[in-house]
Amino acid sequence: MSMAVVGLMAGMALGFAAYFGGFGAFLLVAALGAIGFLVGRYAEGDLEPGDLFKPRGDRRR
């Protein structure tokens, strides 16, 4: 599945949540989507837990 289709589905889910459930539901769906994205990246091996907490300018020699 292409990233465009995934983005389309995520946008539609957020739109439905905002329309039918209000702003609180929109925020809940967005937060759970972000958590699911991070868990999926971790499960695929594309993300290490320490990558989330390292500063960007951290260059060790």
Image: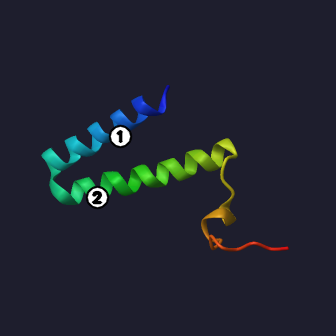
Q: Please give the count of numbered marks on the rendered protein.
A: 2
Q: Which of the 4 image quadrants contains residue 55?
A: bottom right
Quick check: 30 above or below 43?
Answer: below
| Image location (x, y in percent) of residue 51 | 66, 63
* Residue behind mark 2: 27
Residue under the point 47% across and 33% down: 3
**Alpha-carbon neighbours of circle 2 within 10 Å: few (<14), some, or many (≥20)?**
some
Quick check: 9 above or below 40?
Answer: above
Residue 26 is left or right of residue 54, and the answer is left
**Colour setup of the view:** rainbow
Residue under the point 70% across and 46% down: 45
> Is the Cβ of the residue at disc 2 closer than 8 Å to that at disc 1?
no
**Alpha-carbon neighbours of circle 1 within 10 Å: few (<14), some, or many (≥20)?**
some
Measured in 3D between alpha carbons, the distance from the residue under mark 2 to the one under mark 1, in whole angstroms, is: 13 Å
Residue under the point 49% across and 28% down: 2
Regarding mark 2 in the picture, which secondary structure is present there?
helix
* Residue behind mark 1: 10
**Camera-side residue: 10 or 17?**
10
Q: Earlier in the sequence, mark 2 or mark 1?
A: 1
Q: Which of the 4 image quadrants contains residue 7?
A: top left
User: What's the residue type where badge 2 is placed?
Assistant: Leu
Quick check: 55 above or below 23?
Answer: below
Residue 53 is left or right of residue 4, and the answer is right
* Screen quadrant of the C terminus: bottom right
**Camera-side residue: 53 or 35?**
53
